[in-house]
Structure formats: structure tokens, C-alpha cells
Amino acid sequence: MNYDVVIIGAGPGGIFSAYELTRLDPDMRIAVFEAGHTLNKRHCPIDGEKVKSCIGCKSCSIMNGFGGAGAFSDGKYNITNDFGGTLYEYIGKKRALDLMHYVDEINMRYGGEGTKLYTTAGTRFKTVCIQHDLHLLDASVRHLGTDINYIVLENLYNDLKDKVDFYFDTPVLSVEADDERYRVIVKDEVYTCDECIISVGRSGSKWMETVCKDLQIPTKSNRVDIGVRVELPATVFAHLTDELYESKIVYRTEKYGDKVRTFCMNPKGAVVSENTNGIITVNGHSYEDPEKQTENTNFALLVSKQFSEPFKDSNGYGESIARLSNMLGGGVIVQRFGDLIRGRRSTPGRMDDAFITPTLSATPGDLSLVLPKRILDGIIEMIYALDKVAPGTANDDTLLYGVEVKFYNMEVEVDERLECRHKGLYIIGDGSGITHSLSHASASGVHVARCIAGE
Ligand SMILES: Cc1cc2nc3c(=O)[nH]c(=O)nc-3n(C[C@H](O)[C@H](O)[C@H](O)COP(=O)(O)OP(=O)(O)OC[C@H]3O[C@@H](n4cnc5c(N)ncnc54)[C@H](O)[C@@H]3O)c2cc1C
């Protein structure tokens, strides 16, 4: 089978490549290969009753399938160059922002209309933050919410399915370069194409490494972010979340000069566990639908670590910390802030005594036995700093879940077209190590589509 373009991965990067290519050149023959299921068949078996924890499905419905890792996410679509990736370093700040706005417009047309766009522009919180040595990053954030995000994906799929050949449950095994054409090998078939877009996200990181090795594409190690998920009564952060929804705040610690930042804020949301290659870590969700909202807000506090010599494996470092927490807690550990600073473990009794109801059932324990001192000290300092702009953050009953780890793919060497050293082979989205968000990954998809179509 021969195609003009083969796209590997149907996450936001792959979807928006396909969308833009079909728009610019309706005659182009395009195939999308996706390791996971169609959107309607993506169901995580964890129901909190019969299945309480990850059973290691062959294809993880949270991470794989149409919509990619973002399908059941909170759908926080951040329009900014300040975080979410470094796409702007390749294509320029203006183009990157224009593309993120373009994708936002498409999302609105495909079911997101009516959702709110929050912005930090002109907010008084910037001043309040800086007065306490906290730095609020600039962004506009469209909050689709898990429910609307799903509808947008459903509509995009219905639009694309007759224009593109989708192959689901079809992981690509390898890609071979053959005189500026590509051979895409799946289980029983070989497909050829003139141009190939690889957009395999975080879940495809190990596979991406083999492709880079086979095709001798240079890579460099990326950072890893390690920390905890904080959960507190929604009222503590309401003045910030009502106006900004998501505030990305950075703090430089006095003790070590490390940067600690807030990440993925979920007003009235729920803390969830996540399985990345068999390691249980923590994350957060929130819903647009008021019926599904909780009384708590959660967000991550993360510290970045990158290693060079003699140890290069930043992800391996993060994995070891997460494994240690899994070993001690059998999964996610939860600790009250008051217990942490008094140097004692949280127990089921102390948890029952708390004035907050946790949204995730986790094992009460002691995070100081898991997180390296430097990282934990930074997190504690930041909690006290946040307490000045959101009093109540440093209350005894504030819950800390651990560990939260954000792994990033190694950065693949590509040019301003996101084309690697092999002509016609593009590497985009989170799989390239360049993006780490829905907006940047989607924008990278539109960008390569326009490059391929000669726009
Ligand atoms: C729980 C959760 C919540 C999140 N919330 C947000 C949020 O609110 N806002 C935000 O900006 N970001 C969020 N993110 C991150 C966001 O989802 C990702 O940045 C984004 O999905 C990256 O898009 P992508 O297309 O590069 O990769 P992905 O979305 O990971 O898609 C890659 C696809 O490739 C497929 N694949 C992998 N290997 C192969 C192979 N060999 N052959 C065929 N297919 C393959 C995978 O199955 C997957 O479907 C969240 C992530 C998670 C896990």
C-alpha cells in the first residue's frame, strides 16, 4: 500500500497534521496508524469498586488511542510560549502563537464553542505574586474540560474518517528510510509513503528511541520534573482560579536557588493516579460539568532536574523515585502538610481527623522517605510562599500526594520544518521532546502539514 503521507500516532499532533493536510490538499492519500483503540472503545477498567488499580491493559486507554494522552485530560489548552514546550525555538514565537490560536478556533468550531478563555493579561495577581517573590507566567487558557474535550475529538474524528485511512490497534513496529521514501512496518504489512510524520507522544518514547537509533537521528537528554500534587479546599485558591483558572507560578527557593512551579491546576477537580510503563504516579482532572465538580482544588508543585555527566538518564532518575514511592505505598502516598513538617507519617487515623476529604484513595504515609531532601525542601518553601498569596495553602490539612513525575522525551534533532536529517521524515509533538502540551503538540501538527503542502 502506498500513501503520500503516513502519520504515526493519533494524538493531538497526528490529528492536527491530518486535519490541515486534508484541508490544504483534499486529494492527498493519507494514512494514520494508531497503537490504541478508536475513541469510543477507550475505556479504563478502573471503576473504584471491582477494579481499584491499574491492571496493565495491553493498550492503556488513558494514554493510547484516538485523541492520544490528552483524550481524557482536563482539556486545558494553554496559548503561550512561556510553558508547554519550546516549539517557538524552531518556528518563531509569533508563528507558534498564531498556530495555537488557529487550533483553538478549530476546537471551537468542533464543539468547544461557549467554553471560557481565561487570560493573565492585566491581572492584578501578577503584582500580588511578585510582591512575594512569586512569578505568574503569561498565558491565555481555554478550559474545555474533560467532557467537552471528548466531544471535540469525536467531531474531529467524524470529519476525518472519510478523508483519511485510519488503522487502529496497529502499532508501527519500525520505519525504514528507502531513498527518500519511507517503509512503515506494522505486524503483517508494509506501507510506503513519500512523507512520514511521527507523532507518538510520551507513550511512544521507548519506540522513538529505537527509530532514532536505527535511522541515526541525533538526540539529547531532556529534563524530568519531580514533585507532589497538592489538594486543598477550593475556597483557598478561588480568588485566583475564578479569574485565571490555571495560574502557572514560579518560585526560586532561598535555600538552593532551585525553581519550583505550579503545574496543571484543577479547580474543583479530582486527584487521579496514572500508570506510565508500570509506574504509578499522580495527576489531576477537573470537569466543566458542575455536577462532576468536587469541593477541592488540586495542582502539582514540581522541580526540574536534568543530568549530563556521568549520569544522563533524567527519566531513569524520576522513575527510581516513583518506584520507591510505589514500593512504600503500594501506589500513591498521601500525607497531610502538618504531618510532613512535624516529621511524622500520616496515618489512617490522622487522615480521618482532617477537615478535608481526599478525592483519591491513596496510602497515608511519609513523603520525606521518598523525595530527595533538596526537592522536598523546595516544595515546602514554595507552599509557605503560596500561603502569602493564597492563605490556607500551608494549613495542616493540605494534602500532598506523591509522587508526581513529568517525564519528557529525549529531544530529537530537527530543523525549522520539524524535519529530521532524513528528507520527508518529520518528528513532532511530545514524541520529539519539543512539546509537552495539547496546544504545542497540535500546533506542531499544523506546522508540518503546511510545510508538506508547501504553504
Ligand atoms: C492525564 C493527562 C492529563 C493531561 N492534561 C493536559 C492538559 O490539561 N493540558 C495540556 O496541555 N496537556 C495535558 N496533558 C498532556 C497532553 O495530553 C500531551 O502533551 C499531548 O497529548 C501530546 O500530544 P501528542 O500528539 O504529541 O502525543 P500523544 O497525545 O501522546 O499521542 C501519541 C499517540 O501515538 C500513539 N503511538 C505511540 N507509539 C505508537 C506506535 N509505535 N505506532 C502507532 N501509534 C503509536 C499512542 O497510542 C498515542 O495515541 C495531559 C496528559 C495526561 C496523560
Image (tube, rainbow, N blue to C red):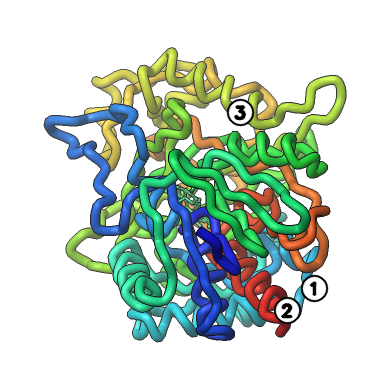
Residue at image x 82%, y 61%?
415
Q: Mark 2 points at which residue?
A: 95
Mark 3 residue's CB less than 8 Å from ligand 1: no
Distance in Å between CA atoms under marks 3 and 2? 33 Å
Residue at image x 61%, y 28%?
318
Q: Residue 366 carries which label?
A: none
Type of amino acid at the residue the image marks with label 3 = Gly
Mark 2 residue's CB less than 8 Å from ligand 1: no
Q: Mark 1 points at which residue?
A: 92
Which image quadrant is residue 267 in?
A: bottom left
Type of amino acid at the residue the image marks with label 2 = Arg
- Viewer-nearest residue: 50 or 382: 50
Residue at image x 72%, y 81%?
454
Distance in Å between CA atoms under marks 3 and 1? 31 Å
- Viewer-nearest residue: 351 or 303: 303
Whether tag 1 and tag 2 are in contact, CB under 8 A, the answer is: yes
Vertical placement of 455 versus 444: above or below? below
Residue 390, percent from left and from top: 50, 56
Q: Nearer the N terminus, badge 3 or badge 1?
A: 1
- Viewer-nearest residue: 370 or 56: 56
> Crowding at label 2, few (<14), some or many (≥20) Cα neighbours within 10 Å?
some
Q: Which mark is residue 318?
A: 3
Residue 225, percent from left and from top: 63, 39
Residue 144, percent from left and from top: 38, 70
- Viewer-nearest residue: 282 or 336: 282
Instruction: Determine the secondary structure under disc 2.
Output: helix
Type of amino acid at the residue the image marks with label 1 = Gly
